[in-house]
Image (spheres, rainbow, N blue to C red):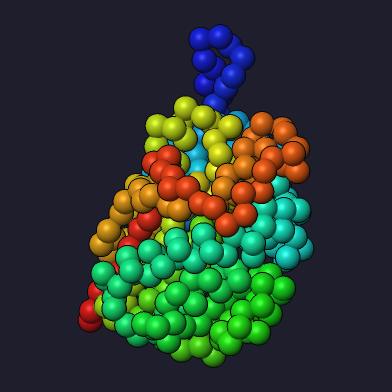
Amino acid sequence: MVHWNARGRDHARSITPKDGGDESAKRRQPASTEASVRDEWMRLLACPACGGTRRRFLYVKNNCDIVRCEDCGLGRAQTNGFDPKGYYTGDYFAGKRSDGYADYLGAEPVLRREFARTVQFIRRFRSSGRLLDVGCAYGFLLQEARPYFDVTGIELAADAAEHCRRSGLQVITGQADAGVLKNLGLFDVVVMLDVIEHLPSPNETVALLARHLTPGGIIIITTGDFGTLSARLAGARWRLMTPPQHLWFFSQESMRRMTASLGLDVEHLDHPWKIVPLSLINFQLARMTGLDPRRLPAWGGAGLPINLFDAMRVVLRKPDP
């Protein structure tokens, strides 16, 4: 169905399983084939957070359709041909990707201060044990956590992972898949800072990580909050609306429903302040305004406390048996 607004131009499509399709072609298919095709179609359509199949088209951004689950509010970008391995390289951390970092290594002092605060937050819920950082970049959080935890990281960007190993950290190059996690064992803490929105199948990855979590262990997730007023008002211009790099846009409700279906309890949810490198602020402002970032001051190792209240931090706990 297509619902038109009062002006008759912008539209939002409410997509249900009965939409579209070649009915004559379906009639020509054997019943078993038709059922298997429909089952696969429904699987692909189903929301990974709540399992719902009703989606509403919102807008197009970067040639990607952005749709929202009408049951839980999870947004998704419908993309084709995006290669994360080719995108998340050293260039992502060195100002050569529009949604990346201006100079991640140069911002180390600021990032380390922020990650030290993150570690102290984590220790409110789990004070010691084995910690896994998924998407650990250059290992700055692992360095801050090392005095308290036995730390391990997983990082897709080969340059960043190699930097970690040169710094004496145990970091695997690759993704958090079954093969990698099988060799790493169980963890008491899993950290996913600004990672879940990049994953092709966030529910499957979180489910896998939960299986490698000790009873009573925790998962820390940070990501944008698609349900906030600022995200709704900004629409396609929301600062975190950057498909195809960002594939998923969680609301609080969609996060709660997805994690509940995986047997995890939401123990804490907030919208925290962060110390952000000024170099990153300038870089992202340049992206949003079309300015040349090279004309803006680099600001070295300076940082600024910021909270736009459109990014959430979630603590999930695996219940004791």
Residue 103 is situated, as x and y percent measured from the top left of the image, at: 67, 57
Residue 106 is situated, as x and y percent measured from the top left of the image, at: 64, 62
Residue 1 is situated, as x and y percent measured from the top left of the image, at: 54, 27
Up/down of 40 relative to 304, above or below: below
Residue at screen point 40% across, 32% down: 229
Seen from the viewer's position, the closer of residues 6 and 314 is: 314
Residue 88 sits in quarter: bottom right
Is residue 41 left or right of 92 when viewed as pictured?
Answer: left
Is residue 67 left or right of 262 when viewed as pictured?
Answer: right
Residue 117 sits in quarter: bottom left
Up/down of 63 relative to 147, above or below: above
Residue at screen point 58% across, 44% down: 281
Seen from the viewer's position, the closer of residues 127 and 115 is: 115
Residue 189 is situated, as x and y percent measured from the top left of the image, at: 38, 76
Q: Residue furthest left?
A: 321
Residue at screen point 42% across, 77% down: 145
Is residue 292 left or right of 266 when viewed as pictured?
Answer: right
Is residue 36 left or right of 49 when viewed as pictured?
Answer: right
Residue at screen point 43% across, 48% down: 305
